[in-house]
Amino acid sequence: MIQIAPSLLASDLLRIGDEVRACELAGADVLHVDVMDGHFVPPITFGPAFVKGLKAITQMPLDVHLMVSNPDHQVEQFAEAGADWISVHAEVAPHLHPTLGRIKSLGCRAGVVLNPATPLDFAFEAAGDADFILMMSVNPGYGGQAFIQSFLPRCERLRAWLDSNGLSHVQIEVDGGIKISNARDAVNAGASILVSGSGLFSGDLAANIREMKRVTS
């Protein structure tokens, strides 16, 4: 099953309640929350209070992507705030296996994130402890970037490795530059969770979600 995850970084935050309801009514599956700390990436975005507020207005799973320099210090806060999924970057999690274990012990799905140039070996080593691998298809930090085409063969290699090593249950999530025009390509490469910000929130949000679901079904 393909899951569509609107990235709230691209939403109108002054109308966040309306935006969330529109996502729900259009059939989106997950809400993606990009947490940036101003260190690992330059911008500063959302904190636990934002996630707690979202949890109060929606039943949709909250997919919290920690783009932070010290994720081990923050997973508990976001789990307590209501995160359902928490993913951490392999580039800044020196003890990745216990970090993933801690996320799961808090009742959340655990994910490993790889930047576009990070070797897939990082995913191979940690996949057995992960529920999903989030592969960036842009360099992290800013919305609206162009999709990096090298994601597609990387995703194919990762999907093939997971399937051949008894890890077919581990999903691949893609984040960055996903639009209606390339969503099917990402699915064909092996992704089953599609994060999209400007690709959905630019124009008619509900219509864009429905069309992305249609082209990937």
Image (cartoon, rainbow, N blue to C red):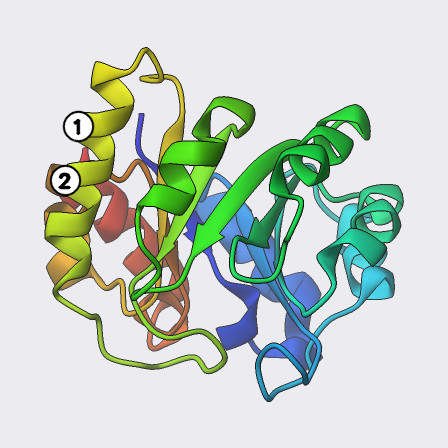
Task: Check the picture and name the quadrant holding the C terminus.
Answer: top left
User: Label 2: few (<14), some or many (≥20) within 10 Å?
Assistant: some
Amino acid type of the residue that numbered disc 1 sits on in the rendered structure: Ala
Residue 169 shows in the view = yes
Vertically, is 166 above or below 124?
above
Q: Is residue 54 left or right of residue 28?
A: right
Q: Which residue is mark 1?
A: 160
The quarter of the displayed image where residue 54 is located: bottom right
Q: CA distance from mark 2 to mark 1?
A: 6 Å
Q: Nearer the viewer, residue 164 or 6?
A: 164
Q: Is residue 14 left or right of residue 51?
A: left
Which residue does the image show at 19% across and 52% down from the upper left? Answer: 183
Query: What element does badge 2 sit on?
Result: helix
Instruction: Farthest residue to the bottom: give it.
Output: 42
Residue 187 shows in the view = no
Q: Nearer the viewer, residue 153 or 214?
A: 153
Q: Is residue 29 left or right of residue 57?
A: left
Q: Is residue 19 left or right of residue 114?
A: right
Q: Position of residue 4 (x, y in %)?
A: 38, 45
Label for residue 54?
none
Label for residue 156?
2
Query: What element does badge 1 sit on?
Result: helix
Q: Position of residue 174 (x, y in %)?
A: 34, 52
User: Label 1: few (<14), some or many (≥20) within 10 Å?
Assistant: some
Which residue does the image show at 54% across and 40% down from the upper left? Answer: 111
Proximity of marks 2 and 1: CB atoms separated by less than 8 Å: yes
Amino acid type of the residue that numbered disc 2 sits on in the rendered structure: Glu
Which residue does the image show at 86% across and 45% down from the upper left? Answer: 76
